[in-house]
Image (cartoon, rainbow, N blue to C red):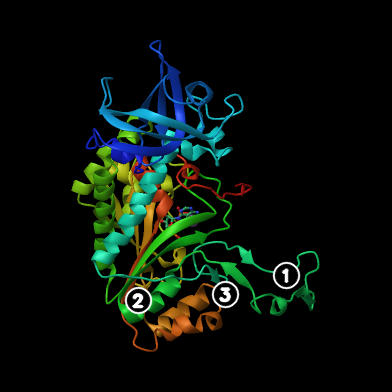
Amino acid sequence: MRKARIARILTGDEVGARFTVEGWVRTKRESKGGFSFIEVNDGSCLRNLQVVAEKGLPYYQEEVLKLQTGSSVRISGTVAASPAKGQQVELRAESVEVLGRSDPDAYPLQKKRHSFEFLRTIAHLRPRTNTFGAVARVRNALSFAVHKFFQERGFIYVHTPIITGSDCEGAGAMFRVTSLDLDSVPLAEGRVDFSRDFFGGPANLTVSGQLEAEVYALALRDVYTFGPTFRAENSNTPRHLAEFWMVEPEMAFCALDGNVELATDFLKYLFSYVLYYCREDMDFFRRFIDPSCVERLENIIAAEFERLTYTDAVRILSESKESFEFPVEWGVDIQSEHERYLCERVFQRPVVLTDYPKVIKPFYMKVNRDGRTVRAMDVLVPKIGEIIGGSQREDDYDTLLERMNESGINPDAYWWYLELRKFGSAPHSGFGLGFERLVQFVSGMSNIRDVIPFPRTPGNVSF
Ligand code: ATP
Ligand code: MN
């Protein structure tokens, strides 16, 4: 018999067809009339398939009656219109085969709702819950939409390296990569001798693919990278991971305005995509996770993003009567409480903040004519704060060199990055979108640890 994913059967277009399905039992109950109702889920969609198994089936006693929540099954049968309320179709079983049993007393997933904290301790089983199934499907759809958006616009997907020789990419603390025996590290003049390490010098996990993406942008114009990035910052917040995925477009012959425009179009595209293709999962998030998540996306799709400079934002914040935990003052980085205040209270829509003081931004951002601010842009959204960070890049050789020296960065280590400003330099811009922040924003999930399959955070690398 033909195999089908449950999502296909539940479209309702297959009544009368015979199929084999495979999946995991969510629940089972016996009816007085001498048959069993088995709810099966295979992850292809949120809903379960109801299977009706009559007691006349082969092995009914041995197999069906002993089926437990969590068992894996292979069931063949005919799709029929369902007399039950709330579902269009069901599967009338002709054979039920148990592939893997599951002891119901030991199985950690019970019918009641479990806390997300508890589910993190069973990351190997949590994808079998409604919430984590929905997160996985939405994450998948968003990844695909990221590629679709850029491919439709002619961007080239570039694979930037995960291991990097630079020890500062301007975006946060790094993890060291080494194959040295840490119990007997080779020393030279009292310090670790990295010349005897695998790469012949110190190496780290990347915090961003930007610098390498710039190389390709200055050859192929519009490129993007989408891959894992790592930050060793000890941020125990619901918005930070030590390992997260980042989407980083980079465009040559593009100034800050074009960058803002791309970021805006990109977010609207992703939100429209997920509302259209993940309707059932989004409806689940609306009902069980965050009642306003769908409406919020719809509003953003329709909204003009507010654009203002950092300087104006600081003025608005310091004139506000709100008491913030962190005081605001020109030259100090604004915190997520300020970002949220601007989006949620002042403008009630996403805000693009530009032209930050250079002292709080990395060396590669283009310095404005005022000499004090850089062409940075952060896209802020309600609930999350910063979801995108980007800038026009410094394309002038001398200014870049000066900024490196000012920021305590060794120009020798970045000779190739500097050289791009010597041979055919061009205005170019790009940004980074934290992929998990995106999934969080879309789903309304409050902790970033619950939107990545296996979260890595300070003190936690299980699974
Ligand atoms: P934040 O101030 O929130 O720590 P950042 O300024 O360090 O962010 P960028 O270096 O601009 O962030 O990185 C680009 C994007 O990557 C951010 O806008 C955010 O969406 C995401 N991001 C940054 N750090 C993390 C992290 N530790 N975990 C998950 N996503 C992150
Ligand atoms: Mn950070």
Q: Is residue 241 found left or right of 202 in the rendered image? A: left
Q: Earlier in the sequence, mark 2 or mark 1?
A: 1
Q: Residue 421 in the image: state x and y as whole percent.
A: 39, 84
* Spot occupied by residue 407 in the image (x, y as percentages of width and height): 52, 72
C-alpha separation, residue under disc 3 versus residue under disc 1: 16 Å
Towards the viewer: 157 or 34: 34
Q: Amino acid at mark 1?
A: Leu
Relative to 313, say whether 125 is above or below. Answer: above
**Residue on which the image places disc 1:** 180
Q: Nearer the viewer, residue 238 or 366?
A: 238
Q: Residues within 10 Å of mark 2 (few under 14, many from 20)?
A: many
Residue occupied by mark 3: 165
How far apart marks 2 and 1 lie (CA) works out to 35 Å
> Residue 161: horizontal and vertical position, in percent?
50, 71
Return the residue nearer the eye: 383 or 333. Answer: 383
Q: Which amino acid, mark 2?
A: Ala
Residue 179: image location, x then y, percent: 69, 69
As drawn, the label of residue 217 is 2
Q: Quadrant of residue 191?
A: bottom right
Can residue 445 be seen in the rendering of this structure?
Answer: no
Residue at 53%, 24% (x, y): give it. Answer: 62
